[in-house]
C-alpha cells in the first residue's frame, strides 16, 4: 500500500475524516441559554433607563440575533472541516 496507511484496511474503504466531537461550538440548548442570558441582562440594565417596553423588545431581538450569530458560526465551522 502507501506510506502511512495501515495494511489491514481494504483498498476500497471510504476516506472520510472522522466526525469531531467539537463540531458544534455550543449546541442548540447552550445557544438558547446564551441568548436568554443576554436578553435578561439587557432588559435589567436598560429597563430603568429607557423604559421597560423598549428594553424588553430590544433585549429579545438582541438575544435572537446572538442565537443566530452563534448558529452561523457553527455552520461555518462545520463547512470548513469538510
Image (tube, rainbow, N blue to C red):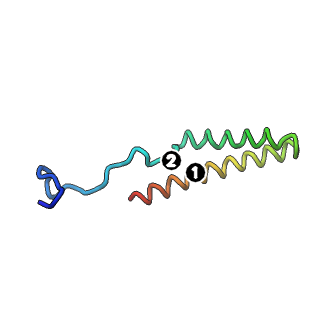
Horizontally, residue 74 falls left or right of residue 38, namely: left
Locate the N terminus by quadrant: bottom left
Residue 57 % position (x, y): 78, 47
Mark 2 and mark 1 in contact? Answer it, CB < 8 Å: yes
Q: Position of residue 23 (x, y in %)?
A: 44, 49
User: Which residue position is annotated with label 1?
Assistant: 70
Which residue is at 61% across, 52% downward?
68
Residue that extends furthest to the front in the rendered view of this protein: 3
23 over 41 or under it: above or below: below
Q: Choose between 75 and 44: the one closer to the eye.
A: 44
- Of 21 and 75, which appears nearest the observer? 21
* Residue placed under numbered mark 2 in the picture: 25
For the C terminus, the image quarter is bottom left
Q: Is residue 14 left or right of residue 57?
A: left
Labels in figure, total = 2
- Residue drawn at x 55%, y 51% is 71
In the figure, residue 43 lies in which quadrant?
top right
Cα separation between marks 2 and 1? 8 Å
| Residue in the picture at 73% in, 39% down | 40
Q: Please name the residue shown 79% across and 38% down the image.
A: 44
Give the crowd class for mark 2: few <14, some 14-19, many >=20 residues within 10 Å.
some
Which mark is drawn over residue 13?
none
Label 1 SS: helix
Q: Using residue 59 as the reference point, say whether residue 31 is left or right of it.
A: left
Amino acid at each position: 500500500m502507501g506510506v502511512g496507511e495501515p495494511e489491514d484496511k481494504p483498498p476500497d474503504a471510504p476516506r472520510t475524516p472522522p466526525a469531531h466531537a467539537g463540531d458544534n461550538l455550543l449546541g442548540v440548548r447552550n445557544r438558547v441559554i446564551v441568548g436568554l442570558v443576554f436578553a435578561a441582562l439587557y432588559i435589567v440594565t436598560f429597563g430603568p433607563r429607557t423604559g421597560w417596553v423598549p428594553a424588553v423588545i430590544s433585549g429579545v431581538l438582541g438575544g435572537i440575533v446572538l442565537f443566530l450569530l452563534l448558529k452561523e458560526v457553527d455552520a461555518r465551522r462545520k463547512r470548513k472541516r469538510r
